[in-house]
Structure formats: structure tokens, C-alpha cells
């Protein structure tokens, strides 16, 4: 029976449903294995108490933002005047060779409508760098003939409203009529500026312009863009500009490095600076991040303006902050995130390392994730004072809820996609056969630009082009660019344009910092803050610098201001920009007090910032809640973090063939994994080793050698029982044949022996070989080895350390075989190969050679292994572009 959800998407013959199932099933299988591997995993750390010295800072003046005005007189001509724009024959502007001759008549029109217009000296003038002529009213002209030239003309009869939008030197300004032709214009206007209105150039005269000296001493103000930041005891009066209170907003933008003591800026790594509310006002709070921090004086100054000081008072705090320290036994080979990051998850319970069953543990009051510092209370509630843990180690269970949500998103697309998700499903159709619609961008002239106003700024044209296309796209828009190219500025422009069109925006990213950065920019821009109403989802500890936008804080403020128990639904409905991490955003959709999921996505557009850190499966979690998707990032920047435990779990359970109905999935035989591991581990097979293995592993070795180059493996001997009905390679030696032809044992460097034959053949094994068996060093064979061969080896451990002593070889190789395996060795090489993907030449050819030895040859597994690689490592940006995907055999790219 056809799935009705896919039928609604136009999938009449089931091809789209089959493509979705085929493409999404590897993701679901990957996530399920990752969940199983992480479900009961515990992470521990040590801690130490912090002497969290704190100071409250407040400025001794108020802060104001001054937006300058200019007053100009627009020199409007009488009706009937025209400006000559260019020589139509040469298609160039007029130059100095053009000679005015008022006695020569102007010819306008053609045929019966042709007229000769006689001019006087009063009918010709030069103004604003143009030649202007009076030709009379009632004409609608764009060309004339005069003095032997064919000339283009533009009417100067411009009707001006009381409110204008002017272009001044490439920037859009608002102008308001004062009286007559006098207008007040936002910003500074120079006498040499070029001013146009709706494409018409206007002549003007500057009447008044803003004088920075009116603000007082230069030590107490500074220019920031087109406005001035002023420090004064009271609001300035009588200046040509709009004055806005800025104290609280200014506090929120300060960091430790903005403050100085005795002329030396404070260091961000030693001090944390944050704005804190108290009785309706904001203050600065400085917290020492290290024990033994020096005391601060009674005043500190601004680094950029030393004459501006802030009072500084020590806060006597009872908060018991702790510093987390990574466990000494943590795996230092693990790439990516620190194990301490698990202690800052959204759904965790922190316990003492030896906590008893039923212990309620600790909950987080406040956190400083970047510094790995916590303030804990006992139990789960919201009340209670901070406490120090009772033991010297803490532990937390790895949170699998993120993986669970990713799997749920995959399954939802497999089973019941919404109509708006047709484009997400189409990603799994064959790339070569799928044609995406051409997008006709919104004309730039139809957009009232708010952020990208300076067209002369390098790159502004490309930023505008992207916004124009993103507004029009029916599915995806991708902005890929290196740091410093204005991606965040482009996001801000896109957000405000979407909001002005009545659309709701979901802003997400893999990191809290990326979201906070966008919100801080909105917070600092008064025009954006008046149009965009953000709601920050997630813990207040993560909303650094934008705490006022955080969900709980906004809800509390709204209820305090109104005196009513305002519903959460009202708060959410009033927000046109909802923000959160790709997983943290789910806190909103899990809230039973809200009605957001009604079959179709509640948001018009999802914007994912820094999506080079976001995998495809992580992207799908918020993507389900939007109709269109905008991806912003740089695929050459830091890639998504991939946990090795999750990847090795999938390699251990590598699915060669998906299950169908009652047929189970076919997994890669562990014996083949072990065989391939040995073939890589002991390469190039130069030293004398005897390795006991199980019979399945010995058979797998035989099968692998039959599918590999015999010359490259002629040093290998397989010693095992006779196999009935099985075609074994020529290097397979039975015990019977070993008795008849014992020289084979001496003709090969690497011997794999079926472990059950070891008691029978132990005394026949060559004395110069090392037997990798736990009891070998106490055996007679080891005694004979010590007598004649102990220091005559040249074993190269992992290609680096050369070992001569046979017993040292035995110990170190045995330790290594017990600490790693096939999945570990494949995993880190796939990871390294991915990291080096942008290198040119053969600099990572060694990885390909090693992976070639590790990947099975007796079964087709390359495609499945690289499908796993294409799920674990590439970002959504790379997945959609195809640049980060590697194809090996069949089934490699999941998209």
C-alpha cells in the first residue's frame, strides 16, 4: 500500500519513497549504533574550588548615542527645466569640448511633432556639474538636438514629499521637510556629496552640519561608524543630532579587554566581564577566572578612553564555583571535543564518582562553559545554595538525547514527511537526474536595504545578490565564504527583510557563540531592535551577552511588567525570530504549553549559521520545522566534531546489506575485521612472528589473501587444520604437511596458527620467532629464543620505534593488540584522510595505502565504509555541494 504522505508529495509510483528510504536508512543505522555505544557511557573529571573574586563596576557618567543631522536646502528648478546627461552618438557624458550657443535653436521631436525652441541666455545655466536648459512645460523629453549634438536629457521637474528616501554618496538616508525646500537629513552631508532621489540628481546647499565640538571635550566622545558615543553627566541639549540613552546597551557590549588598570588592559583569559541586572539597571560584573587574582583599585578606566572611569567595588559572594579538570586517565588520542563538555549538556545529572544508587546528584545553577567552571546545587530543583561536591571526582552519563532527536527526524522523513519537506526528500534522488528550479531573484531596487546600505563597500554587491536570491528561493540558499566576508552582516539583512515580509525566522547553529553573535548585532542596532523581536531558546548560561533575550528572562519580564500570568504562547507568537542550537531548539517544541506542531512547519525560513560545523543529520532536527532553508558557512573552516566511539561502533556493526521484512541485516564478519587488522598491523612482514588466532579468523585471512597480490604477502604462512570443501590458498599448511615439510615454518616471517594446534606444534616452531601468546615468556620456546635470538630483532613498532629485544617486542606488541582493533585503526585513518582533503599532491598517499590494507577484499565493503565516512565527517554544506563526499565502490555518498 502506498504511503499517503508520499502520495501527497506527488509520488504516485513509490520512487520518491524508495529513494528516501534508501538514502536515509544508512543515517538511521549509524545513529542507532551510536546511541547503543553511548547509552551507558560514563565520563569523569576532577575538580578544584575557585576563589571567585568578583567586582561590580558602574560608570560615573551616562552613555549616550548621538546620531548627527544635516540641514540642506534642495535647489529645485522651475518646471520646464532639463539637465543634459550625455552625448547619444558617442554614448559618453559631455566633456569640455561641448560649446554652448544659446542662439542655436534646440530641436525636439520628429516629423509633424518637430519643434524649434529658441533660447535666451536666461534659459541656459550650469549647476551641480551639469548643463541645464529651460525648454518649456508640457514636454516629455529624453533627447534633443542642439549645437550639432544628439543629446540625452533628464527632467528636473521633481515633486518632493515631506518624507524622502535619498541616496547620498551611495548610502540610503531618510530626510524630513523642515519647511519649504529645507530638509533635515540623517547623517553628515558634505557640500561635495552627490544626492539623488528616485534616480534624479538634486542640487542642494548645506545650511547646517553637525559639529563634533558641540559634544564637549574630545576625551569624552568617540566616533563609531556614523554616530558618536558620548560620556556625559546629563543628556546634551542644543546639538544637531538625535540623542539616545545608550548606557545599558553599552554595558552589554563590554568585555574585560575594554577595561584597563594603570594603563594595562585586563586579559580575557583572566577575567570574565558580564552585564548583570539589579533593580531595573544594568551593571558590569568582573569575575576572576583564576585563584589568587590581584585586587582591583577603586576605579578602572576604559582602554580606548582613559579619561572615562568606572567605580569598582568588591562583591562579597558566597557562591561556590568549581573548576573542572580533565581526568588524567582520559584518552589523549581522542580528537575533537574535551570530555569536560559533557558536563555542560542540557539534560544531564552530575554525580559524585562513587555515588550510591538513587543519589539525586547535582544540578547546575550557573555555568561558564568556555572556562569549564560550574556552580552546583544539590538535587534537581531550582532553589538552594551552591555547594562543593563531597568527593574529589565527578561523573556524568553521556547524554544521547541529541542522537535520539536526530534519529527521530530521520524516521519522520522516512514515514510521514510534511508537504513542505518535499525538497528535503528530493535530496536523496539521483543527482544526475534531478533538476532544481531556477530562481528569479527579487529585484534589488524593490528591497529597502537596512544593513547593506553602503554599496561602495567591497563585497556589498555580492551580499545584496545573495539576499535577493535567498528571499526568492523556494527551497535552499547557500552562502559559502571565508571569515571576514560579511556573512553575519548578510544574515542580519536577510532576517530584517524576511521579517518585513511577515515571515517567521528560525535561526540555528551548532554553537551557542554563533547565535549570540547575531543577536548581539541586533541588540546594538536600534533600527533592527525595533523591527526584529528575538527569542533565545536555551539555558541562560549559554546566552552570553544576550541574557535579556533568553526565553525564561523574557517571560518573567513580561509577567512582571503586566502583573498578569502571560501565556508562553503569546511570548512565542510575538517573536518573529526564534534562535537556538540545532538540538537545543527542541526545548521549544517539547513545551506542552505551546501549540507549534500542527502538521506543517511553523517557521517560514530556517537560517543555519556556521553550518560547516553541522552534519546533515544534525541539520535535519531544526529543518523539519521550516519550509525553506538558508545555509551559511565556510566549508574550509572547522568541521563537525565526530566522536570516535560512535564511528567505531558503526564499523564494528558495519551493515553490508540492509534487512528486509523478516530477513536480518548482513553485517561485516568480525573475523574478517580481525584478519584485515592483522594484515595492516604486521606489515611489511619482515620480523619473525607467530600469531595464534581462532579458526574463523584464520579462514578469513585465507579468504583475504586469495583476493590480494600474492607477491606482497609471500612472507605469510597460515597453519591450520584441513578444510573440507573449502578452497584454501597455497600458503595454508596443515599439521600433517608441517610434519612432512617443516622447512615451511622457516621460509616465512609471519605465521598465523590456529590456536587449538598450538599445544601440538609448539615444540616445532622456529626458535628465532616470537610467539604472541600470553604465556610465551614462561615457556620452553621462550627459553630457547632467549639463548640465541633475544637481541637480534629489527621490529619497527608502528613504523617508528625499532625494537631489538624479542621479549620487549612481545610485551609491546601484545599490549598494542589488546588496546586497539580494526575499527579503531580504520576510524582514525578515515578521520585523518578527511582532515587532509584540501591538500594537493600525494602528501597523504600513505593513508590510502594503509586503508587499502585495512579494507576487506574478500567481500564488498568499501562502499559501506565510505558511506559511513560520508555520514560522520562532512558538514551539511559539503554534503549538499558534494565536495566533502568520497565515493568508493557502491553506495558511498548518502546524498
Image (cartoon, helix red, strand yellow):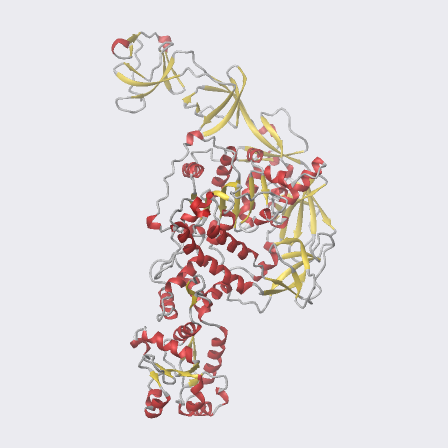
**Residue 637 placement, left or right of 849:** right
In the rendered image, is residue 335 in sight? no
Q: Position of residue 733 (x, y in %)?
A: 35, 85
Q: Residue furthest front?
A: 1
Q: Name the residue nearer the viewer: 473 or 784.
A: 473
Q: Is residue 245 above or below residue 11?
A: above
- How many numbered discs, if any? 0
Which residue lies at the image location 36% right of the left edge and 59% below the top edge? 887
Q: Please tell me in which quadrant of the rendered image residue 593 appears.
A: top right
Q: Name the residue nearer the viewer: 413 or 71.
A: 413
Q: Position of residue 301 (x, y in %)?
A: 64, 43
Q: Please tell me in which quadrant of the rendered image residue 702 appears.
A: bottom left
Q: Name the residue nearer the viewer: 624 or 232.
A: 624
Q: Position of residue 67 (x, y in %)?
A: 57, 30
In the rendered image, is residue 573 in sight? yes
Q: Name the residue nearer the viewer: 473 or 542.
A: 473
Q: Position of residue 761 (x, y in %)?
A: 41, 90
Q: Is residue 404 above or below residue 174?
A: below
Q: Please tell me in which quadrant of the rendered image residue 342 appears.
A: bottom right
**Residue 245 placement, left or right of 201:** right
Q: Is residue 195 above or below residue 423?
A: above
Q: Is residue 774 above or below residue 635?
A: below
Amino acid at each position: 500500500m502506498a504511503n499517503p504522505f508520499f502520495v501527497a508529495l506527488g509520488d504516485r509510483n513509490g520512487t520518491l519513497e524508495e529513494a528516501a528510504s534508501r538514502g536515509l536508512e544508512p543515517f538511521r543505522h549509524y545513529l542507532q549504533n551510536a546511541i547503543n555505544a553511548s547509552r551507558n557511557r560514563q565520563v569523569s573529571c576532577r575538580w578544584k574550588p575557585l576563589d571567585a573574586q568578583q567586582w561590580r563596576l558602574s560608570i560615573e557618567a551616562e552613555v549616550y548615542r548621538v546620531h548627527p543631522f544635516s540641514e540642506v536646502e534642495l535647489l529645485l528648478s522651475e518646471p520646464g527645466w532639463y539637465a543634459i546627461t550625455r552625448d547619444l552618438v558617442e554614448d559618453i557624458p559631455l566633456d569640455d569640448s561641448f560649446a554652448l550657443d544659446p542662439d542655436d535653436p534646440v530641436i525636439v521631436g520628429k516629423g509633424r511633432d518637430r519643434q524649434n525652441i529658441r533660447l535666451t541666455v536666461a534659459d541656459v545655466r550650469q549647476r551641480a556639474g551639469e548643463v541645464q536648459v529651460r525648454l518649456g512645460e508640457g514636454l516629455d523629453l529624453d533627447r534633443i538636438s542642439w549645437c550639432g549634438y544628439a543629446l540625452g536629457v533628464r527632467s528636473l521637474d521633481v515633486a518632493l514629499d515631506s518624507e524622502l528616501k535619498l541616496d547620498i554618496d551611495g548610502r540610503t538616508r531618510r530626510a524630513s521637510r523642515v519647511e519649504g525646500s529645507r530638509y533635515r537629513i540623517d547623517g553628515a552631508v558634505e557640500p561635495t556629496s552627490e544626492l539623488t532621489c528616485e534616480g534624479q540628481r538634486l542640487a542642494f546647499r548645506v545650511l547646517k552640519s553637525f559639529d563634533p565640538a558641540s559634544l564637549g571635550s574630545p576625551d569624552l566622545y568617540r566616533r563609531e561608524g556614523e554616530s558618536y558615543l558620548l560620556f556625559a553627566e546629563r543628556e546634551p541639549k542644543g546639538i544637531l543630532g538625535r540623542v539616545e540613552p545608550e548606557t545599558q546597551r553599552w554595558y552589554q557590549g563590554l568585555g574585560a579587554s575594554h577595561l584597563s588598570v594603570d594603563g594595562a588592559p585586563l586579559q580575557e583569559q583572566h577575567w570574565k566581564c558580564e552585564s548583570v541586572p539589579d533593580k531595573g539597571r544594568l551593571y558590569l560584573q568582573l569575575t576572576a577566572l583564576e585563584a589568587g587574582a590581584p585586587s582591583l583599585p577603586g576605579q578602572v578606566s576604559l582602554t580606548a578612553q582613559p579619561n572615562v572611569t568606572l567605580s569598582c567595588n568588591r562583591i562579597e559572594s558566597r557562591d561556590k564555583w568549581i573548576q573542572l579538570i580533565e581526568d588524567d586517565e582520559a584518552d589523549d588520542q581522542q580528537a575533537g571535543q574535551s570530555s569536560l563538555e559533557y558536563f555542560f549538556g542540557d539534560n544531564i545529572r552530575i554525580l559524585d564518582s562513587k555515588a550510591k544508587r538513587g543519589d539525586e546528584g547535582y544540578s547546575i545553577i550557573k555555568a561558564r562553559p568556555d572556562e569549564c567552571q560550574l556552580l552546583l546545587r544539590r538535587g534537581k530543583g531550582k532553589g538552594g545554595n551552591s555547594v562543593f561536591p563531597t568527593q574529589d571526582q565527578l561523573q556524568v552519563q553521556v547524554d544521547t538525547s541529541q542522537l535520539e532527536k536526530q534519529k527521530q527526524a530521520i524516521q519522520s522523513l522516512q514515514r510521514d514527511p510534511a508537504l513542505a519537506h518535499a525538497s528535503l526528500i528530493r535530496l536523496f534522488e539521483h543527482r544526475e537526474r534531478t533538476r532544481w528550479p531556477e530562481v528569479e531573484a527579487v529585484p534589488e531596487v524593490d528591497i529597502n536595504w537596512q544593513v547593506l546600505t553602503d554599496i561602495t563597500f567591497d563585497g556589498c554587491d555580492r551580499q545584496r545578490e545573495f539576499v535577493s536570491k535567498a528571499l526568492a528561493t523556494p527551497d535552499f540558499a547557500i552562502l559559502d565564504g571565508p571569515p571576514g566576508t560579511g556573512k553575519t552582516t548578510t544574515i542580519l539583512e536577510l532576517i530584517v527583510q524576511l521579517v518585513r515580509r511577515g515571515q517567521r525566522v528560525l535561526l540555528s547553529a551548532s554553537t551557542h557563540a554563533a547565535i549570540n553573535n547575531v543577536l548581539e548585532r541586533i541588540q546594538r542596532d536600534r533600527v533592527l531592535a525595533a523591527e526584529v523581536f528575538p527569542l533565545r531558546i536555551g539555558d541562560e548560561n549559554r546566552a552570553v551577552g544576550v541574557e535579556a533575550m533568553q526565553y525564561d528572562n523574557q517571560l518573567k519580564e513580561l509577567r512582571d511588567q503586566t502583573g498578569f500570568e502571560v501565556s508562553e504562547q503569546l511570548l512565542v507568537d510575538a517573536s518573529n525570530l526564534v534562535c537556538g542550537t540545532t538540538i537545543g531548539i527542541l526545548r521549544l517544541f517539547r513545551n506542552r504549553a505551546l501549540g507549534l506542531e500542527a502538521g506543517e512547519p511553523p517557521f517560514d525560513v530556517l537560517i543555519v549559521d556556521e553550518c560547516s560545523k553541522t552534519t546533515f543529520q544534525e541539520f535535519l532536527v531544526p529543518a523539519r520545522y521550516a519550509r525553506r532553508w538558508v545555509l551559511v558557512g565556510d566549508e574550509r573552516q572547522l568541521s563537525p566534531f565526530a566522536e570516535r566511539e560512535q564511528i567505531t561502533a558503526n564499523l564494528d556493526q558495519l551493515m553490508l546489506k540492509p534487512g528486509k521484512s523478516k530477513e536480518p541485516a548482513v553485517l561485516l564478519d568480525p573475523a574478517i575485521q580481525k584478519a584485515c587488522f592483522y594484515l595492516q598491523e604486521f606489515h611489511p612482514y619482515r620480523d619473525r612472528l607467530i600469531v595464534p588466532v581462532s579458526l574463523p579468523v584464520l579462514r578469513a585471512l585465507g579468504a583475504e589473501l586469495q583476493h590480494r597480490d600474492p607477491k606482497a604477502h609471500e612472507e605469510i604462512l597460515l597453519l591450520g587444520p584441513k578444510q573440507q570443501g573449502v578452497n584454501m590458498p597455497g600458503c595454508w599448511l596443515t599439521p600433517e604437511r608441517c610434519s612432512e615439510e617443516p622447512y615451511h615454518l622457516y621460509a616465512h616471517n609471519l605465521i598465523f596458527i590456529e590456536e587449538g594446534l598450538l599445544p601440538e606444534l609448539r615444540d616445532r616452531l622456529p626458535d628465532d620467532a616470537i610467539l604472541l601468546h600470553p604465556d610465551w615468556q614462561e615457556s620452553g620456546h621462550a627459553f630457547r629464543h632467549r639463548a640465541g635470538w633475544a637481541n637480534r630483532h629489527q621490529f619497527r613498532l608502528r613504523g617508528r620505534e625499532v625494537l631489538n629485544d624479542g621479549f620487549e617486542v612481545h610485551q609491546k606488541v601484545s599490549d598494542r593488540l589488546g588496546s586497539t582493533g580494526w575499527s579503531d585503526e580504520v576510524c582514525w585513518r578515515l578521520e585523518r584522510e578527511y582532515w587532509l582533503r584540501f591538500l594537493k599532491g600525494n602528501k597523504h598517499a600513505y593513508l590510502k595505502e594503509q586503508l587499502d590494507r585495512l579494507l576487506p577484499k574478500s567481500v564488498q565493503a568499501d562502499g559501506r565504509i565510505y558511506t559511513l565516512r560520508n555520514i560522520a565527517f562532512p558538514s551539511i554544506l559539503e554534503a549538499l555541494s558534494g565536495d566533502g563526499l568520497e565515493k568508493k565502490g557502491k553506495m558511498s555518498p548518502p546524498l
